[in-house]
Each structure stands twice: as structure tokens, then as C-alpha cells.
Image (tube, rainbow, N blue to C red):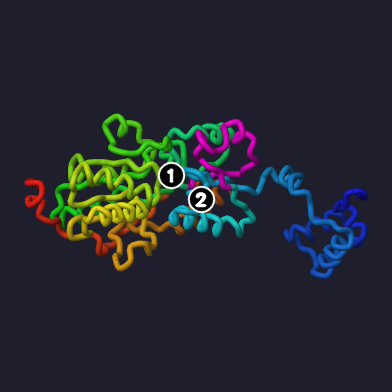
Amino acid sequence: MGERVTLAGVAARAGVSPSTASLAFSGSGPVAAATRERVLDAARELGYLGPDPIARSLRRGRSGIVGALIGERLLYAFRDPVAAALLDGLAEALTPEGTGLLLLSGDAARTGPTPEQVSRMPVDAVVFATCGADDDPLLDVFLSRGVPIVAVDGPDRPDLVLLDVDDYGGTLDLARHLAQLGHRRVGVVTLPLRLDGRSGPVDDARRAVIGFADCRHRLAAVEDVFGPVEVTEASANDIDEGQRVARQLLTRQRPTAVVAQSDLLAVGVMRAAAAMGIDVPADLSVVGFDGIDTPWLGEHTLTTVVQPSAEKGRTAGQMVTRFLAGERPDNVRLPVRVHIGSTSAPPYDLGRTTGAD
């Protein structure tokens, strides 16, 4: 192979100065259209593909890359409609700024990058895109490097900039809706409380180590309306896991309503109910959180809390842009709304089957 073609060689072929050639490539300066075309023609003739991106990033002090941490395995980001919409909104906001996304698994214990690897990653900022744990081991690594962080739904710490939705207020309205219908015996199916693969009944010890702010707030809202409730944890946010743990809950106890902490889990609860001969909503009301499309439900529409997932992603991107401009953005809380669908109704007469309500 011959010698590596340089920008100076392109400038010489085009008959311009190296600085003019650089401006022609970057599009950031006043270069006449004819001159720019001459430079690009010379580059094509010589096989020059553009400035060395590594050298350019060193000169600018920027990599042009923003890390997006996903709370679970990366596959989760493509299976969960909420995560996918958020990442799409984030990319929509960052791409016009010339910034790319680097997807990272936040599940460092199993599949994610190690703190040592993270200490070398060339990122300009980091978005904890799907509710990072308050004690995520990668968090302090980024903070020690001075990397700007936008926490989406968490980690919820005073030293971070937080973007979230009104998890508590939305779930409170949802719980009040069930209470107004007459429900008193309610069960909850939670999102993973920690990324350790555990599922099943949640006792006081497990409650004490909840790692995610949205889980805490959504559970607190239900219990502020109904008092202590039966809680079952899902090990992952997907339909199959929702169905599996809902069967456990419905076997241990017969609530008249189940509050699922996501719409995917709610669909799983409805599948478990159908398999057990429990009619929704005549025998069991099921409600969720997110507001995603739920084609799995056929003629039913889910009663749920609708959150603006794509807007949340765009807002996160705007907050990152402000960080990179030298500003520290304020915390942002986006509103949510309750959508009343066909999966909630007044409770059946528990006295016929259990002798209590």
C-alpha cells in the first residue's frame, strides 16, 4: 500500500490552504461552493475519506458520543416499547447536534461493562436511560471523571440531574380509580426491585433494598390508598414473567384487582387470569403503567397510566445538549395521565367465594 493520504495532500491537489480544506470538510466556515467542490473532488481522486476522527476528537476535547445505559441486558431495549421509544426520542434530539449514541448494558454484574472499562470509555455525557439503580457501581466512575449525567427515572440522588415522570401521582390516581369502583383487596406485581434475578412474594427485607425510584414511588402510591397490600416481584419486565408471577399471586390470594407496574406485566397478569378461568374485568380488574400499544389484548383496552416516553427521550437529549454547552440543566418532571380502559370494573362479590372483602 502507498503512503497515507493527508489533508495537506488534498489541499495541495485542490490548490488551497490546509485550513481552507479543513473548513470545506467540516462545513463550519465561509468556503465558496466552487472551492468546496474542488476540495472534495481532489479528495475523491486521492482516496481521502476525511479527517482522522480520533485526532479530531482530541483537538476538540470531545468524542461526539453520548453513552446510554440500559438498566438490564441490551435486548431489553429492543423488546420493551417504552425503552425503544425513549431511545428513539433521545437519538432524535442528539443527531442534529452531531452526537452519536453508544448503548451500554447497566447490568454490570452479568453482561455490562466493568467499572475499569467504563473509566476508559470516550463519552462526552451519559444518560441512565431506563431507571438506573441508586447504587449502580458505574455511577461513581462517571462522576469521578466529571462526565455529565442525566438520570432518566433514576438513579435518584441529589448530586445528579434527574428527568422523571410523576410515578407517584399517576399511580395514586390509578389506585383511587380502583378504590372508587369499590375495590379493597388489591395485589401488586412489581418491576424488578433489583437486578439479581429474584422473583416472588416481597417481604419487608426485600422492600428495604428496593434499588429503583419508580418502583418505590408506584408501590407507595398504591399503599397510601389501600394500606399494606400483597406484593409480588417480577424478575424481568416482560409478558411471560408477568404471567408466571401473577399465577403465584392469584393462587396465594384472590384480590379483586391487580396493579401491575408496567403494561407488559399487566398483559401477563391478564394471560394468567385467562388460563385460570378468571374473567377480566368481571372477576378481576387489571391495570398497568406506561400507555403502550397492547395488541395482545384483542378487544380489551388496558386501564393504565400513560407516560410520554418519546418526549422523555427528547427532553433527555436536550438536557445533554445543555450540559455540553456548559450549562447545568434543572431537574424535569413530566406529567402523566390515567387512561380508563375496559380492564377495570367494580369488584365481584368476594363473600360468595372467600367470605370476606
- Expressed as whole percent of the image width and height from the top left, the position of residue 140 reads 52, 32
Q: Is residue 133 left or right of residue 281?
A: right
Residue sitting nearer the eye, 169 or 81: 81
Residue 194 visible within the image: yes
Residue sitting nearer the eye, 246 or 62: 246
Quarter-of-image position of residue 22: bottom right
Asked whether 262 falls inside the magenta stretch, the response is no
Task: Tell me the amino acid under the disc marked 1.
Answer: Cys
Give neighbour class at mark 2: few <14, some 14-19, many 20+ (Cα, 10 Å).
many
Residue at horizontal 46 percent and vertical 59 percent from the top: 310
* Marks 1 and 2, the one that precedes in the sequence: 1
Number of the label disc, if any, that sits on residue 319: 2
Relative to 57, say whether 145 is above or below.
above
Dot 2: what SS?
helix
Give neighbour class at mark 1: few <14, some 14-19, many 20+ (Cα, 10 Å).
many
Residue sitting nearer the eye, 157 or 32: 157
- Expressed as whole percent of the image width and height from the top left, the position of residue 247 reads 28, 47
Residue at horizontal 42 percent and vertical 35 percent from the top: 196
Q: CA distance from mark 1 to mark 2?
A: 16 Å
Residue at numbered disc 1: 131
Dot 1: what SS?
loop
Quarter-of-image position of residue 209: top left
Camera-nearest label, 1 or 2: 1
Task: Tell me the amino acid under the disc marked 2.
Answer: Met
Span highlighted in magenta in the image: 103-129
Q: Is residue 262 left or right of residue 3?
A: left
Residue sitting nearer the eye, 204 or 318: 204
- Expressed as whole percent of the image width and height from the top left, the position of residue 199 reads 35, 39
- Expressed as whole percent of the image width and height from the top left, the position of residue 315 reads 48, 55
Asked whether 121 falls inside the magenta stretch, the response is yes
Relative to 15, say whether 212 is above or below.
above
